[in-house]
Structures are given as structure tokens and as C-alpha cells.
Image (tube, helix red, strand yellow):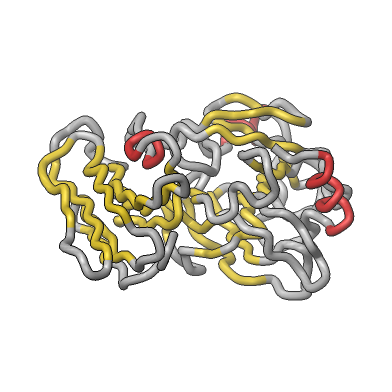
Amino acid sequence: MLTAGFALLLSLAGGAAMAPSAGAADLASGATAASLAPGFQLPFPCGQSWTGNSSASSAHQSWEIDFNRGGSADADLGDTVVAAAAGTVAISAHQGSTNGFGNLVKIDHGGGWSTYYAHLNSRSVSAGAQVSQGQPIGTVGKTSKPGNNISAHLHYEVRLGSSYPSNIQKAVFNGSTFGYSVQTVTSNNCGGGGNPHTAESVCGSGYGVVDSAALGTAGTVYLLYNNSNGYNCVATIKRSSVGTATATTAYLEVQGSSRVTDSGNFEYYAGPVRASAPGKCVKWGGKAGSSSYDSPFEHCGS
């Protein structure tokens, strides 16, 4: 949640403001437009709870939302951001001095609908890519234009048509309109597969996501770290064939030590695979369906 101090930083820095983007003509408002809306979910992994605030930034034009979790500045820096609905990546770029969005991903969902994910620390999709609901697209950050000193948060928008800012729509998650101006929401964005497990719940208390990699539409492999005991953890969370035992793998290798792997036919996830790695580099990865990911040695000490 944004504290008063964080809200002031956002207000002074400008959460985000963007000129109109080219797109489909505005659609009629009301029941017709609502009936065409995608089934949006919270832009965070299944089971996570985030607090949204639409009034903490003076830069907001309408129904934009700034999302945070954790009680301190940058507590959620680097946390995974996922697609609120399936679509095509229209923008994946750092906006530079153009506006306050910093690293921005925009996804077009058809029918004039689009979603914006701003201030990202990193982007994991490219313009033109097809993404599925729940697919990781980047991580929470605090990038903006030069001179904007903001705390980490996700700036999220839903737009319909091209007449900015009147095209900004109220956000709907899992069929319920966001409770403006502040509400804590738990994600049902389970990649369409209904997986009730998250990497955090699999690895256990004290572990936070450090990195993630999409395994096509079949799943996502996550690297986590526990600051209190110096352990890393890897878990592969399935996004398709959830509840059916299929080949799934998660592995973790601390530099200088043997690789630890959990591999088999699992219904929901592979892992957790844990290893002590304070101050050491790790190699991690996993497999689900026909997709796999293998990292280099990285994240040395975290």
C-alpha cells in the first residue's frame, strides 16, 4: 500500500500521463461496450493480494490505478507483472522523455480495448508478441522520465478507443469493478487454468520472487529468495493442463554445488527446490509442456 510519503512522491513526480495513442475508433459506452470487454483479471500472479490507489497521484486523469504491496518503499520492486487478458503487445519500450511512463507495456485486446502497464523495472515481452492471460510481461519498477523520482509501483490503465483521457475506463477484475479509490484485491489471474498455487505459497513463508520466465502458455518458472536464511527456491507453476498430471520440472544449481531437480508428472507445480546460496550465483530453470527455460549463473547473492 502507498503510505502518505509514497503518495507525495508520486504526486510530485507524476505517476504517468500520456498523449493519445493511435487505435480503433471509440466504441459506444454503456451495456454494448461492457458486453465486449475482455474478462480482465488482476495484473499479478494467482493468489497475490495488492492494494490499488487511484487518488495518490496528481498526474492521474481518470480511473488509473497505482498498485503496491508491502509496507515500505520499493518493497515490491521486481515483483512479477502479468497480462490482465490475452492480446497482442502493441508497445514494449522505455518512453524516455516522452511522458512519465518509463518502461511501458501496452497490450491490445481487440474491439478497441487495451491495457497499460507502466514504470516497469523490466519488460519480458516484445512488440508484436501474442500473450496469454496470466503470462508474465515484466516486473514492478520505478522507471519514469528524467527527474521523476518515484517509489516502485505498477501504474495500470484500461482504455477503450482513442479519445484520451475520456477513453480511460474503470478497471474490472474477475467480473467486479475496482472499489475506487482504494481497495485491496486478491488475484484470480491463474492463466486460465485455475491453478490455486503461487510460487510464494509453494516455497513458503519469507520467500519473495526475484525473477521469472514464461514457459510458453504451459507455465511459469520462478526464482525466489529468503533474506532471513539465505536460501533460494525454484518452483514451476503450471498454467495449462492444471489438475492433470503432466511432465513438469524445476531445478536450482548453486555455483560450485550439484544441481537439485524436481521432475515428474505433476498436477499443479514442480518444486519447491531449495538451496543455501548467500553471496553465491545460481543457475535455475524448469520445463512445462514443450517449453523450457535455462538461466545462466546470475543473481549472485539474492
Q: Quadrant of residue 259?
A: bottom left
Determine the residue positioned at 45% across, 55% down.
210
Residue 104's x, y, as percent? 63, 63
Direction left: furthest residue: 264
Residue 211's x, y, as percent? 43, 57
Determine the residue positioned at 35% across, 52% down.
232
The C terminus: image quadrant:
bottom left
Q: Relative to residue 268, is residue 223 depicted above or below? A: below
Q: How many marks?
A: 0
- Judged left or right of residue 113, residue 165 is right
The N terminus: image quadrant:
top right
- Judged left or right of residue 35, residue 134 is left
Q: Relative to residue 146, is residue 199 depicted above or below? A: above
Determine the residue positioned at 32% across, 71% down.
297
Residue 41's x, y, as percent? 52, 36
Q: Relative to residue 187, is residue 116 depicted above or below? A: below
- Judged left or right of residue 259, residue 240 is right
**299 or 36: nearer the eye?**
299
Residue 219's x, y, as percent? 30, 48
Determine the residue positioned at 59% across, 54% down.
77
Residue 247, can we see it? yes
**278 or 110: nearer the eye?**
278
